[in-house]
Image (cartoon, rainbow, N blue to C red):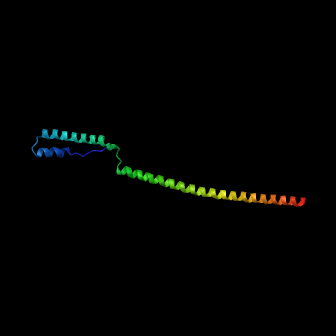
Amino acid sequence: MSTITFDTLHFANRLKSVGFTDEQAQVITELQLSTVDTTLEQARHDYQLDDLATKRDLKEIEIALRHDVEKVEIKIELLRADTGRMIAESKADLTRWIIGAGFLQTTLIIGVLLKITHLI
């Protein structure tokens, strides 16, 4: 919560030094202190000062965001590595299937040709 420093002793002594009585200086000082407090409360209400972010608040948020971004970047790198591994595995599986299908086609074609040559 914000406060305004108000030196009541200095204020009262200053009033006395220009001719005010102790009682007058005390009353004026109390009124001035009340005015300062009221003005601060009104400013808090009008400008919602308690909801304002300080430089420290912003710095803490910046540090937290940087930390979060670093964690996300690490996760992205892990996902890239995992995706690359999965793509390589898929290529290897696909190559095996294509080679297997090629051998099967070749075998079928040779079998059909042998069967045809026996018929003729």
Corner quadrant of residue 25 = top left
Question: Quadrant of the image for the C terminus?
Answer: bottom right
Q: Going 75% across and 59% down the picture, which residue do you hit?
A: 102
* Residue 2 image point, x, y percent: 30, 44
* Residue 19 image point, x, y percent: 9, 44
88 sits to left or right of 1? right
Corner quadrant of residue 15 = top left
Q: Going 84% across and 58% down the picture, which residue do you hit?
A: 112
Question: Quadrant of the image for the N terminus?
Answer: top left
Q: Going 31% across and 43% down the picture, which residue do you hit?
A: 47
- In the rendered image, the residue lying farthest to the left is 19
Q: Going 18% across and 41% down the picture, which residue do you hit?
A: 29
Q: Nearer the viewer, residue 32 or 25?
A: 32
- Image label count: 0
* Residue 100 image point, x, y percent: 75, 58
* Residue 97 image point, x, y percent: 72, 57
Location of residue 75 with respect to 12 vertically, above or below: below
108 sits to left or right of 45? right
88 sits to left or right of 45? right
Q: Nearer the viewer, residue 96 or 56?
A: 96
